């Protein structure tokens, strides 16, 4: 899990170090990657390029509800021959629709980059993601940190105007994910990539 603000190309490039260079799997089979809310592929493309350095066969399933963003991602892939070793599978769906299908494929890497603000039920989505991981697989979640200026402003806003369960709103942080992982007894590492402007 990584904590930090969203944004610039440099920030996306800094995400590269969050993906393991090599992931244990059957070398005769594809390395399977599931992107939740991949948007137009900025983060996915960085992860996939890193994985392609040590895995010749990569299968990338992209779950994204915005058709326009999928088309932008497809264009990015078409224009860059380095994605030749990747088989893409495009799912024009929300995470909720995708997981409701009861899909049984398991993945070596699952990621959700600045997406978990938008899902209806944070805990249900985390559970669904976890269940689609192979034994020993990796789950990478990037969300805004529960520290820094942005979070202080949001926390202040929530204290003044918020009511009900904050987790039912998009005001969610990496701390909420950590709490769920702790409650589930799942081991994790955190990493902070907070731009200076947001500290
Ligand atoms: C802030 S963008 C992040 C895109 C991409 N992961 C990135 O970092 O460049 C959030 C993405 O989540 C998608 N999204 C919104 N609601 C979603 C949902 N319920 N399930 C899956 N994706 C969703 C949006 O369409 C959008 O592409």
Image (cartoon, rainbow, N blue to C red):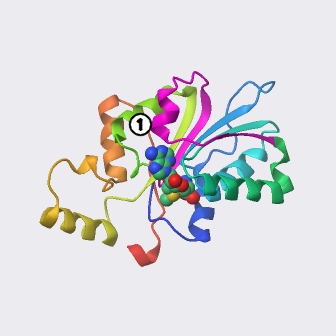
How far from the left and from the top, in percent, is residue 102?
51, 23
Task: Give the residue at x 32% y 53%.
Answer: 172
Circle 1 residues within 10 Å: few <14, some 14–19, many ≥20: some
Judge left or right: residue 72 versus residue 189. right
Residue 181 x, y percent position in the rendering: 36, 36
In the image, the residue with mark 1 has its CB under 8 Å from the nearest atom of ligand 1 = yes
Q: Residue at x 83, y 42 (%)?
A: 85
User: Residue at the front extreme?
Assistant: 67
Residue at the farthest bottom position:
197
Range drawn in magenta? 86-115
Residue 91 is inside the magenta segment = yes
* Residue at x 76%, y 58% (from the top left corner): 75
Q: Quadrant of residue 80?
A: bottom right
The residue at 35%/41% (across/down) is 122
Q: Position of residue 167 (x, y in %)?
A: 27, 47
Residue 56: x %, y % from top left: 82, 39
**Magenta highlight on residue 103:** yes
Q: Mark 1 — residue?
A: 125
Badge 1 marks a residue whose secondary structure is helix
Is 149 situated above or below 26? below
Query: Is the residue 157 above or below the residue 100 in the image?
Result: below
Query: Looking at the image, is 118 positioned above or below residue 121?
Result: below
Quadrant of image for the C terminus: bottom left
User: How many numbered callouts?
Assistant: 1
Q: Is residue 77 left or right of residue 160?
A: right
In screen coordinates, is 14 left or right of 21?
A: left
Residue 121 seen in this snapshot: yes
Residue 16 visible within the image: no
48 or 169, nearer to the observer: 169
């Amino acid at each position: 899990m990584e904590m930090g603000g969203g944004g610039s190309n440099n920030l996306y490039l800094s995400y590269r170090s969050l993906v393991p260079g090599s992931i244990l799997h059957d070398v005769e089979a594809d390395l399977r990657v599931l992107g939740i809310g991949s948007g137009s592929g900025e983060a996915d493309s960085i992860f996939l390029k890193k994985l392609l350095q040590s895995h010749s066969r990569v299968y990338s399933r992209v779950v994204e509800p915005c058709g326009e963003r999928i088309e932008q991602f497809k264009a990015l892939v078409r224009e860059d021959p380095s994605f030749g070793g990747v088989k893409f599978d495009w799912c024009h769906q929300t995470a909720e629709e995708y997981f409701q299908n009861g899909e049984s494929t398991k993945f070596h890497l699952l990621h959700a980059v600045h997406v978990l603000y938008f899902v209806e039920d944070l805990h249900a989505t985390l559970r669904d993601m976890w269940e689609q991981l192979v034994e020993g697989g990796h789950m990478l979640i990037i969300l805004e940190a529960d520290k820094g200026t942005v979070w202080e402003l949001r926390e202040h806003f929530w204290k003044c105007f918020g009511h009900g369960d904050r987790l039912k709103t998009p005001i969610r942080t990496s701390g909420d994910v950590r709490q769920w992982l702790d409650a589930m007894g799942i081991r994790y590492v955190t990493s902070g990539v907070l731009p200076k402007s947001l500290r």
